[in-house]
C-alpha cells in the first residue's frame, strides 16, 4: 500500500471511519482514510462495506457514480461493481467480445458497524489482509440504543500529536479554562492509579477530581478512562444506576489531517432532554483542543527539540512505547508485551 502518509501511522488495526447514522441505506460516501481514497457504503439490506474509491478502468472515483443499494455504476463509462468490489457489467462490450469480468476487481477492506459506529480495518498490505483480525474496540454496559450524540472535528496535525494531546492531563486549566470546567485557581495536586490494559493503559476507576465541575451535575460518580492503540479513548462514568460513556477516536486522513469523533452514550433520561444545552459545551471543548493544536503546529513547523517531564507526560511516553512494542512484536512474530506498569502518577492540574 502506498500513500503520502508518515511511517508513524500504525496499520493492521481498526480505525473509526464515520458514525453509522451518517450513512443511510443505498448511500455511498467517498473519503480519505490513512491516505487511501475509500468508498464507504450501506447496501439495501443495511450492511456496510468499504472499498477503494477508484474505478480500475480509468481511475475516476467511484463515489462520483450512482448506487442502487446493490451495485455501483461508474459515472464515466457505466462499469458496474457489486458491494464486494467485483465487476458485474461493462456496457461497451459486445456480446461477441469475450472478456473475463473476474479479472476486474476493486480492493475491498474489512468493515464493521459496532455500537453505532463504522470501523474500517486498514491493512499493511491491502492485497494480503490477515485471516484473523483483531477485535473492534468495544464499550461495556452500553449498546446502540444508548447512542445519544456525536461531534466531529478536523485537527491540523499528525496523529502522534493529536493522540498525545488527547491523553494530556495537564492542559485543562489553560486550554479548557472556563467556569463550567476548570480555572487556574482550582489547580491542585492529583494522584491517579494506572494499570496496563488491552494494547494500552487504564486510569483505574476513581472519583472525579473536585475541580472538574461538569461531573457534579450527575451526583455521586466514578470514572474509568482507557486508552487503546491506535488512537481510541473511552471514558466510562458510573452515576448511580446509570452509565455515561464518552468514546473519542482519532483517525488520520492524511499525514497532517486527523479526524476526531466524540461519541456519547448514556442511560440518563433527563440528559437526553438537555442535549440541546449540552451539545454547545461539547463543541466548545473540542474547538479549544483543535485551536491549541493549530497554534502548536506553528512551532512544530520549525522541527524543534521537544521535552517531556514526569509524571504528567508519562501517558505520552507510554503511547510511544506501546507503538514501538506493537511494531517489534509483529516483526519478531511474538506476543505483544505491554510496557505499561501498574503504577500511580502525580501531577498538578
Image: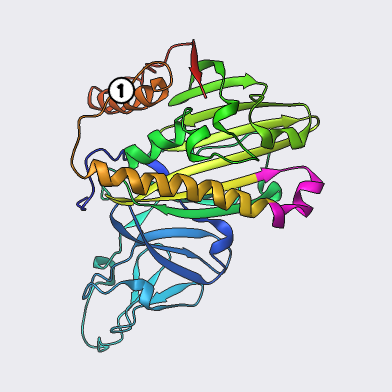
Can I make out residue 114 in this image? no
Give the residue pinned by disc 1. 325
First to last magenta residue range = 265-277
Identified at 57% across, 68% down, the residue is: 25
Q: Compared to 212, does 16 lie above or below?
A: below
Question: x, y percentage for residue 295?
Answer: 34, 47
Within the image, what quadrant is residue 33 found in?
Answer: bottom left
Tell me: 224 left or right of 276.
left
The mark total stands at 1
Within the image, what quadrant is residue 217 found in?
Answer: top right
Q: Compared to 167, does 111 lie above or below?
A: below
Tell me: 111 left or right of 97.
right
Question: x, y percentage for residue 110?
Answer: 41, 50
Identified at 43% across, 44% down, the residue is: 250
Question: x, y percentage for residue 249?
Answer: 47, 43
Residue 224, magenta (yes or no): no
Identified at 53% across, 28% down, the residue is: 226
Q: Nearer the viewer, residue 228 or 100?
A: 228
Mark 1 secondary-structure assignment: helix
Amino acid at each position: 500500500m502506498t500513500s503520502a502518509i508518515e511511517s508513524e501511522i500504525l496499520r493492521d488495526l481498526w480505525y473509526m471511519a464515520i458514525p453509522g447514522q451518517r450513512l443511510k441505506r443505498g448511500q455511498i460516501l467517498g473519503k480519505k482514510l490513512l491516505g487511501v481514497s475509500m468508498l464507504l457504503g450501506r447496501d439495501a439490506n443495511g450492511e456496510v462495506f468499504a472499498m477503494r474509491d477508484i474505478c480500475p478502468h480509468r481511475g475516476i472515483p467511484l463515489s462520483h457514480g450512482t448506487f442502487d443499494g446493490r451495485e455501483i455504476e461508474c459515472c464515466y463509462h457505466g462499469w458496474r461493481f457489486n458491494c464486494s468490489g467485483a465487476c458485474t457489467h461493462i456496457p461497451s462490450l459486445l456480446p461477441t467480445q469475450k472478456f473475463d469480468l473476474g479479472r476486474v476487481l476493486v480492493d475491498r477492506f474489512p468493515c464493521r458497524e459496532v455500537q453505532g459506529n463504522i470501523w474500517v480495518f486498514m491493512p499493511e498490505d491491502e492485497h494480503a489482509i490477515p485471516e484473523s483480525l483483531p477485535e473492534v474496540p468495544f464499550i461495556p454496559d452500553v449498546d446502540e440504543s444508548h447512542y445519544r450524540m456525536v461531534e466531529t472535528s478536523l485537527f491540523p496535525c499528525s496523529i502522534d500529536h493529536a493522540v498525545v494531546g488527547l491523553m494530556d492531563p495537564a492542559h485543562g486549566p489553560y486550554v479548557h479554562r472556563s467556569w463550567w470546567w476548570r480555572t487556574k485557581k482550582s489547580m491542585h495536586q492529583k494522584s491517579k492509579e494506572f494499570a496496563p490494559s488491552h494494547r494500552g493503559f487504564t486510569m483505574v476507576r476513581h472519583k472525579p477530581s473536585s475541580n472538574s465541575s461538569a461531573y457534579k451535575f450527575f451526583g455521586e460518580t466514578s470514572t474509568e478512562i482507557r486508552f487503546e492503540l491506535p488512537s481510541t479513548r473511552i471514558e466510562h462514568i458510573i452515576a448511580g444506576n446509570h452509565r455515561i460513556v464518552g468514546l473519542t477516536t482519532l483517525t488520520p486522513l492524511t499525514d497532517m489531517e486527523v479526524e476526531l469523533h466524540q461519541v456519547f452514550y448514556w442511560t440518563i433520561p433527563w440528559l437526553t432532554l438537555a442535549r440541546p444545552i449540552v451539545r454547545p459545551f461539547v463543541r466548545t471543548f473540542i474547538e479549544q483542543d483543535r485551536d491549541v493544536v493549530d497554534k502548536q503546529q506553528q512551532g512544530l513547523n520549525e522541527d524543534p527539540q521537544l521535552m517531556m517531564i514526569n509524571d504528567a507526560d508519562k501517558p505520552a511516553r507510554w503511547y510511544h512505547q506501546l507503538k514501538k512494542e506493537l511494531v517489534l512484536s509483529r516483526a519478531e512474530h511474538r506476543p505483544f508485551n505491554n510496557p505499561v506498569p501498574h503504577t500511580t502518577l502525580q501531577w498538578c492540574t
